[in-house]
Amino acid sequence: MRNLIFAAFVSIFSLFSTLAFAAGPSSKLDKVDIDLTDNASLQRGAHTFVNYCLSCHGASLMRYNRMAKDLGLTDDQVADNLMFTTDKIGDTMKIAMRPEDAKRWFGVMPADLSVIARARGTDWLYTYLRTFYLDDSHPMGTNNLAFKDVGMPHILWEQQGYQTIDEQGHLTVAQEGELTPREYDMMARDLVNFLAYISEPSKLQRLALGKWVLLYLAIFFVIALALKKAYWKDVH
């Protein structure tokens, strides 16, 4: 029993160590407050996603009707406000452009964002959305602190405006956008919140179920321990 517990502990410790290493250093990333229970934030994030991201980046693992249910929306609300690439509520969130056009224009198919929050991390995504800056040497005219030489333009430039970078890596607003810095940060946070949701739509249900599983295991452990003592009481 002790060996099994020790092995389980080592496995769990190794898992967390691996995840921490994979996530990379977090000191250079901006922290973002993710709340998957905030339906208002998720709805705003969904609106931003379909209006600014879905033209190039799909979310092929997410269906519109599932999103409607999880975000507290009706099918009609989703169809009227969030569906621009299909007219079937049961379809997945496909991109607007054709794959062959994407390859011809960009040289490669833009990444599907279904699990980008799990792959990159929410802090990385939040930092990425906030750290575009002007760069004349780059084909897109902008670059990014979180993703150097990124091939994607700053699609939210109208909302954030443009930033310049100094030799120390500090960003300064060069051209104001439609939103204040605080409003843009909230927009970025809502979008990252939505990306975190589509990366694992069942997370809240899984966490809720996990509490009952742990309770069951605890009760089972007590029963198993009592049985072990009963079986071995006469063995010395």
Image (cartoon, rainbow, N blue to C red):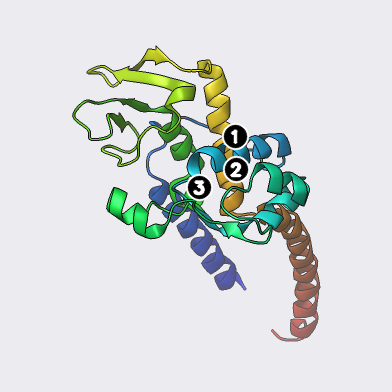
Looking at the image, do the residues carrying marks 2 and 1 touch, with CB atoms under 8 Å apart?
A: yes
Q: Are marks 1 and 3 in contact (CB under 8 Å)?
A: no
Corner quadrant of residue 216 = bottom right
Q: Which of the marked residues, 2 or 3, is nearer the chain's N terminus?
A: 3
Picture coordinates of residue 65, whole percent (x, y): 71, 56
Residue 133 shown left or right of residue 31 in the figure = left
Name the residue that disc number 1 marks: 190
Q: What's the CA distance linking mark 1 and mark 3? A: 13 Å
Residue 67 horizontal side relative to residue 200, left or right: right
Amino acid at dot 1? Asp
Q: Which image quadrant is residue 104 in?
A: bottom left
Q: Position of residue 71 (x, y in %)?
A: 72, 45
Determine which of the numbered discs, if any, sits on residue 117 in the image: 3
Residue 235: percent from the left, percent from the top?
Answer: 72, 86
| The N terminus lies in quadrant | bottom right
Does 82 sit left or right of 214 as displayed?
Answer: left
At horizontal 48% and vertical 58% (from top left) the residue drawn is 15
Query: In the rendered image, which residue does mark 2 sit on?
Result: 194
Q: Give the SS element for disc 1.
A: helix
- Of circles 2 and 3, the one toward us is 2
Q: Residues within 10 Å of mark 3 (few under 14, many from 20)?
A: many
Q: Amino acid at mark 3?
A: Ala
